Image: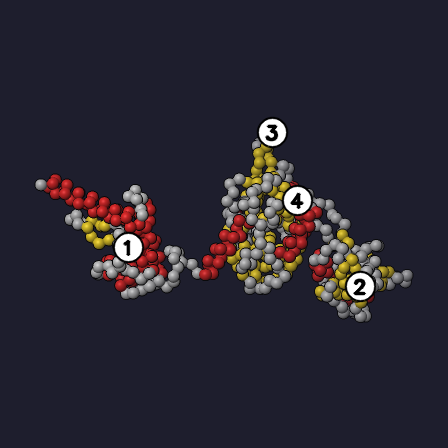
Amino acid sequence: MLASSRTVLSAIRGWVVAAAALSLHRTSGFSLTSQSRASTLVRQAPRAFLNSGIQPLSLRGGTSSLTAPSAFQRAPLRWTATGSASAPVGFEALSVSELKSLLAERGVDFRDCIEKRELIARLEKAMQEGRTPKSSASTFSALSPDEDRLISLFKSASPSVVFIQTTQLALESPFSMRALEVPQGTGSGFIWDDQGHIVTNFHVIEPALRSRGGNIRVSLQNVPEDYEAKVVGAEPEKDLAVLQLVKKPTSQDLTPISVGTSSELQVGQRVLAIGNPFGLDHTLTVGVVSALGREVRGAAGNVLRGCVQTDAAINPGNSGGPLLDSQGRLIGVNTAIVSPSGSFAGIGFAIPVDTVSRIVTQLVRYGRVKRPSLGLQVAEDQIMQGVLKRVNLQVEGVMVVEVAPGSPAAAPVSGRALSGVQRRSNGSILLGDVVTRVNNSPVKKVEDLLSAVEECEVGSVVELAVKRQGQGPEERVRVRLTEQQQRRSPL
């Protein structure tokens, strides 16, 4: 008799399950074998119905008023110990994380809930109390508009950022002639154009240039293979270098970065830094512009002028990566940090994009930077201030010590040629001319003069405001810049 009851009970269960599956097949177009898809439908149904104001059967206490059976009502049946079918599972079809998300959307505290049934009870109570989602977000992890924008910016800009690794050849042992490729360092860079040019810091690739058998490898996002890169040109004084991939990837794999401008940056403006700190590729940090026009000492010991200071975390490995504005446009190249330990301490610096564009364009076109020159030698700031104090002169500017023959300053387009320091026949010293302005930009120290001239192109005409021997009214002198004699290339 017991065996016969079990047989009947098993048959009833099979009939009910088959009927439920057949109803699902007829109303939704799913086949009986589409178990995974049907399960997904059942799991997604509660959220859609909750957001539309429809409650599950367990919360309505009556028969559904809907004309057609819903997916929520077709949730799997739960069997009791006696073998009878109970109400639809409803919330039990959801995972713990989904239940927590629904509770969070309704502002319900669930931190004291340990088991899943406690979360379900808490959610049912919230539904009975008429609590509705605070937002209409359709995803379980609702994001603020600011977060959505940040995520979108990262997704659009990160494919332009590359991972750079330098290696060198080293003997396997002192007694072996077999050479191994040994990693030297890592850094960041970004894709400049669709020709495969990569911009980075000079100090990132310098180890490969200085070592025997050095090599540079570049990794692109979502591309399994690494690419060998060659150096197109470098400007150590600006800590910039341009690479080119030896084997050009497909156009789909090359995403040139969007370039902005640094001339209109403001303190407090939001910025994003993407790079590979400590070898952790495509890391995003966020901050603000802390200051502008900073002078910092680069990795090679040279002074980098006009840098952008930011509190966005920049660590070893971020060097060469892009600093972006809130529109995802390049506004600087991350290059240095101020920290006793070498790790981020709240102060990072980036080379402004206006400088980067000027340097990179020349490196791509000529393989070197054509530096403009006035043909002057000037006195250091401290020496000039001491001389002016001794002769009781008060003037701000840069004093000319010597003028190269045939230089722009010796043969101006208009106005009198500049004069340097001269010794008279009686042994007295005649002071040189003092440059006070370049194209209406004030010159108070040597760095001001260098920065103003560097911003100009070879062959352009600039206007100098000059005080003869540091006295009298200012005179206007227009000169045409020539190319400075090139120093020995680091390459």
Residue designated by label 2: 477
Of the numbered discs 4 and 1, the one sitting upstream in the chain is: 1
Q: In this view, does 17 lie above or below 286?
A: above
Q: Earlier in the sequence, mark 2 or mark 1?
A: 1
Upstream in sequence: badge 2 or badge 3: 3
The label on residue 232 is 4
Q: Which of 322 and 248 is in front in this view?
A: 248
Give me the residue at 73% from left, 45% from top: 488
Q: Residues within 10 Å of mark 3 (few under 14, many from 20)?
A: few
**Lower position in the chain sequence, tag 3 or tag 4:** 3
Q: Distance between the residues labelled 4 and 1?
A: 65 Å
392 versus 333 height, above or below: below
Q: Which of marks 1 and 3 is nearer the N terminus?
A: 1
Q: Position of residue 260 (x, y in %)?
A: 60, 57
Q: Distance between the residues labelled 1 and 3?
A: 76 Å
Label 1 is placed on what type of residue?
A: Ser
Per the model, the C-alpha gap separating discs 4 and 2 is 37 Å
The image quadrant that residue 164 belongs to is top right
